[in-house]
């Protein structure tokens, strides 16, 4: 007789010391048989929506938390009935299987560890080696969890488990709820069948819902408050809560200094137009942000002091020899700053691809915790909102952030005459504890020089 035991799975820390997460949905029910690393839940952290894999193979005996509940890290969320390690093992196990080392789950929620008898050794990279591209297209990027393909040992005569919830993000589900749309009836066109906002709006536009709902979908506005309700109160949680705490900490910890530079970017915009028409860039999304990002990466080579952080605990200034470029992204869930790892190694084409993937993933609410941590310097594009300049607050752990304003046709002095030129204002905020005025000014001037005359890149590389 096979011995079994009950094991609890406690909510893990899903990234950088996060203390709580919200249960968005369960993918399993009580009585279901699950395999190791099978997706059992979708949880929303303060940074992203994450799929939670099962740390055990067994039968679900209890779900301790309901969807919509905010759970502290370390609290039990689900219980499993699993085979006791001391229990009998299957007699028919193949010799090759018996020789394999035991496969253990990874309790931080990102799947089981690789079967290995030794510890991985980091090999030092030589200067002659050319690293492979570090940013892959969304379609080919490996998932956070790779479910183990195992067959459940026992199945019920009749499957009474509920159907899997349609794959979508919290903002999409909120929109569908506001419009009275049943997501079971909507076909997803996103990656892996993900239901997008456009899918919901297109479904409404098909005439299946009342005209009032169709108008709401077209306008994409929040529903009106109930009659007589003068206030609407929304719980502070998720991204909004994390962002608020991080910004307050940054504003009252690092002494911010902001400098401004207005630049004639006509030549840069002309270059952008030529690149869009060239064959190598066909199909790539090129925007002013692409050129500003490249200018920042080039300017950091001459001014590495801005690619650093202040380590208060160890009383050290940490200068990074790599650039994880953060891009502030406005999403339905709030402001996030995902970053492009080792952006300084990317070509302009690769950088444009990475920027497009980063923003699309952020707006879909699918940015991984890893992509939201480890940034070294950031850019925020306030120009897309028609804003010229601002005083951006530093992303915690970074020395600088650059805000790029709108590109406007403005009367400007050009070759000793007044001409209508394309002009942009750059706003640089930096931590005055480790970046002095000269360093910040030189960096901002270099970024401006590259945008005013892209040919200056030859002199700075």
Image (cartoon, helix red, strand yellow):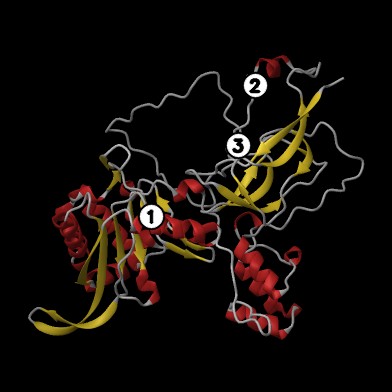
Residue 244 found in image quarter = bottom left
Q: Which comes sooner in the sequence, label 3 or label 2?
A: 2
Residue name at image x 55 percent, y 55 percent: 366
Crowd rating for badge 2 (residues with CA inside 10 Å; few <14, some 14–19, many 20+): few
Q: Is residue 435 left or right of residue 15?
A: left
How far is mark 3 from mark 2, CA to CA?
15 Å
Q: In this view, does 244 lie to the left or right of 184?
A: left
Q: Which comes sooner in the sequence, label 3 or label 1?
A: 3
Residue 404 image offset from top left, x and y in percent = 31, 67
Residue name at image x 26 percent, y 82 percent: 409
The residue pinned by badge 1 equals 249
Question: Furthest-right residue in view?
Answer: 157
Q: In this view, does 338 lie above or below 408?
A: above
Residue 355 found in image quarter = bottom left
Residue 69 image offset from top left, x and y in percent = 67, 54
The residue pinned by badge 3 equals 111
Residue 149 visible within the image: no
Residue name at image x 36 percent, y 63 percent: 380
Q: In this view, does 59 lie to the left or right of 310?
A: right
Residues at marks 3 and 2 touching, judged by CB atoms closer than 8 Å = no
Q: Please state, as top left, top right, bottom left or bottom right, where the N terminus lies in the image.
A: top right
The residue pinned by badge 2 equals 102
423 vs 31, nearest the viewer: 31
269 vs 264, nearest the viewer: 264
Secondary structure at numbered mark 3: loop
């Amino acid at each position: 007789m096979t011995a079994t035991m009950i094991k609890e799975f406690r909510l893990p820390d899903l990234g950088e010391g996060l203390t709580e997460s919200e249960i968005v949905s369960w993918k399993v029910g009580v009585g279901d048989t699950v395999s190791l690393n099978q997706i059992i839940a979708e949880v929303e952290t303060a940074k992203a929506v994450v799929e939670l894999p099962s740390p055990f193979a067994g039968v679900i005996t209890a779900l301790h938390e309901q969807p919509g509940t905010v759970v502290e890290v370390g609290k039990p969320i689900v219980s499993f009935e699993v085979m006791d390690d001391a229990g009998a093992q299957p007699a028919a196990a193949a010799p090759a299987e018996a020789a394999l080392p035991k496969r253990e789950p990874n309790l931080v929620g990102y799947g089981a560890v690789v079967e290995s008898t030794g510890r991985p050794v980091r090999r030092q990279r030589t200067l002659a080696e050319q690293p492979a591209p570090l940013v892959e297209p969304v379609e080919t990027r490996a998932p956070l969890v790779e479910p183990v393909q195992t067959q459940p040992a026992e199945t019920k005569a009749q499957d009474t488990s509920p159907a899997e919830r349609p794959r979508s993000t919290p903002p999409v589900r909120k929109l569908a709820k506001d419009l009275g749309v049943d997501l079971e009836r909507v076909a997803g066109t996103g990656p892996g069948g993900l239901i997008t906002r456009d899918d919901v709006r297109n479904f409404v536009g098909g005439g299946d819902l009342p005209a009032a709902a169709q108008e709401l979908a077209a306008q994409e506005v929040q529903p009106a408050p109930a009659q007589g309700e003068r206030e609407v109160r929304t719980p502070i949680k998720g991204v909004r809560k994390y962002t608020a705490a991080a910004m307050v900490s940054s504003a009252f910890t690092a002494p911010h200094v902001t400098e401004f530079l207005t630049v004639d970017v006509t030549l840069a915009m002309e270059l952008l137009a030529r690149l869009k028409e060239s064959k190598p860039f066909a199909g790539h999304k090129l925007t002013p942000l692409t050129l500003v990002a490249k200018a920042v990466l080039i300017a950091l080579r001459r001014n590495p002091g801005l690619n650093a952080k202040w380590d208060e605990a160890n009383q050290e200034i940490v200068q990074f020899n790599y650039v994880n470029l953060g891009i502030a992204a406005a999403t339905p869930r709030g402001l996030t700053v995902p970053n492009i790892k080792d952006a300084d190694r990317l070509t302009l084409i690769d950088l444009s691809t990475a920027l497009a993937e980063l923003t699309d993933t952020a707006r879909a609410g699918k940015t991984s915790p890893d992509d939201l941590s480890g940034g070294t310097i950031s850019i925020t594009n306030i120009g897309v909102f028609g804003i010229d300049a601002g005083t951006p607050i530093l992303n915690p752990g970074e020395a600088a952030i650059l805000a790029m304003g709108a590109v406007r046709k403005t009367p400007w002095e050009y070759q000793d005459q007044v001409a209508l030129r394309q002009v942009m204002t750059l706003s640089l905020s930096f931590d005055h504890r480790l970046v002095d005025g000269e360093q910040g000014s030189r960096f901002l001037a270099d970024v401006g020089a590259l945008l005013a005359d892209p040919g200056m890149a030859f002199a700075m590389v």
